[in-house]
Structure formats: structure tokens, C-alpha cells
Image: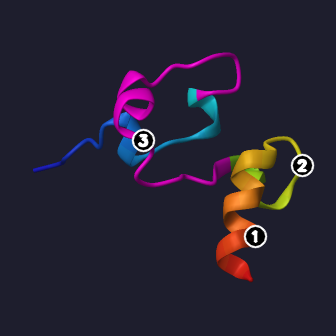
């Protein structure tokens, strides 16, 4: 059995780069960030990097 996470449990840069594409995240918040494409280490998505840096320090 494979469980597919809803978007707010696997929030990726693709969900917000060109507008909001995850209604549950807007309504309930983001539960888990998926740092694909190196977003935790670049300035392309500052919000993702800020969350990473907060946990890092």
C-alpha cells in the first residue's frame, strides 16, 4: 500500500512559486517542507531558506 501525502504534508516550492497551488496549506498551514531543487541552500525561495536556517542554528 502506498499513501500519497496531501500537499500541506509535502509542501514543495512548486506549490507557491507561481501562485498558491495548495488550498489545505492556506487553510491549515504547512506541516512539512520538502526542500527539493536545493531551495534550502539558495536565495530563490527565501521563505524555505529561512525555515532551514532557523532549524540549523
The correct choice, above or below, for 54 with respect to 40 in the image is: below
Quote the CA–CA distance across marks 3 and 1: 19 Å
Q: Position of residue 22 (x, y in %)?
A: 45, 25
Residue drawn where x is 36% and y is 29% of the image: 27
In the drawing, what numbered circle is on residue 43? 2
Element carrying mark 3: loop
Residue 9 lies, with reference to residue 28, above or below; the image says below
Which residue is the extreme one toward the bottom? 57
| Span colored in magenta | 16-36
The residue at the point 69 percent across, 66 percent down is: 52
Q: Which residue is mark 3?
A: 29
Question: Where is residue 34 shown, x and y percent of the image?
Answer: 54, 52
| 11 sits left or right of 36 in the view | left
The residue tagged with tag 1: helix, strand or loop? helix
Q: Which residue is mark 1?
A: 53
The residue lying at 76 percent from left, 57 percent from top is: 49
- Dot in front, 3 or 1: 3
Amino acid at each position: 500500500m502506498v499513501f500519497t501525502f496531501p500537499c500541506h504534508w509535502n509542501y514543495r516550492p512548486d506549490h507557491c512559486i507561481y501562485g498558491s497551488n495548495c488550498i489545505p496549506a492556506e487553510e491549515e498551514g504547512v506541516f512539512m517542507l520538502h526542500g527539493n531543487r536545493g531551495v534550502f541552500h539558495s536565495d530563490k525561495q527565501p521563505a524555505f531558506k529561512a525555515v532551514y536556517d532557523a532549524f540549523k542554528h
